[in-house]
Amino acid sequence: MFLLRLVDVGASRLRVINTVARILQIPLAQAKTIVDLTPDRITVGDAKRIAFVRRQLQQVGATVAVDYCPEEMHPENWVPANLSTDKVTCARCGEPLFFAIPGRTTEQETVAFAQTSKSPAFRQVASAKWIHPGVYCSNGCCFIMVNLEHPDKYSGEEP
């Protein structure tokens, strides 16, 4: 998840406000408030969405910046129904799922998960103190690896 910040409105503040209103599908008054009072948080979203909004704002002369925003991530959305019906435990064995979230999951949590895991696949994780972002069952029943690509990878076409 990424955060888009407005660094400078450029030559036409009104065009930026209109663009924010159109892209975020909000009233002009609300867009004005965002631009004037919370420019450090124009919007949050996935890489494709942020690339699109960034491009639209740059086309009207605004300068924007992108930040990684792990606190806006909702990793429970990474878990499909066949992996877990409650998005907390493994559907196959009932063990709690481990969520590896960049910027939120600590090395200590990763090592503790690997050390308590019953799957030999996680032995290297303990020594590396790193695991690919995703959701894992400690028994090795299932896993989902998540790719968190940066908005720079996208052209900014409408998602």
Image: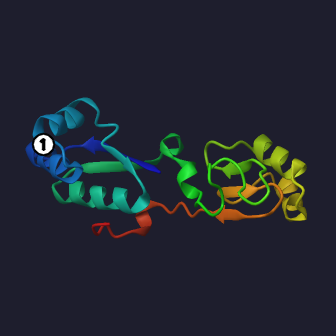
Residue displayed at 10% across by 49% down: 15
Residue displayed at 78% across by 64% down: 141
Q: How is the image coloured?
A: rainbow
Residue 85 coordinates in the image, percent (x, y): 62, 54
Residue 43 coordinates in the image, percent (x, y): 33, 45
Q: Nearer the viewer, residue 70 or 116?
A: 116
> For mark 1, what is the residue?
13
Instruction: Quadrant for the C terminus, please.
Output: bottom left
Q: Nearer the viewer, residue 56 or 83?
A: 83
Name the residue at the top extreme. 37
Residue 74 coordinates in the image, percent (x, y): 52, 47
Residue displayed at 24% across by 29% down: 37
Residue 144 coordinates in the image, percent (x, y): 65, 63
Q: Where 126 sits versus 39, above or below?
A: below
Q: Amino acid at mark 1?
A: Arg
For the residue carrying disc 1, how many other residues have a C-alpha within 10 Å: few (<14), some (14-19), or many (20+)? some
Q: Count up the numbered dots.
A: 1
Does residue 77 appear to the left or right of 12 in the view shown?
right
Residue 29 in which image quadrant = top left
Residue displayed at 84% across by 60% down: 122
Secondary structure found at label 1: helix
Q: Where 36 sits versus 15, above or below?
A: above
Does residue 104 appear to the left or right of 91 in the view shown?
left
Does residue 35 appear to the left or right of 85 in the view shown?
left
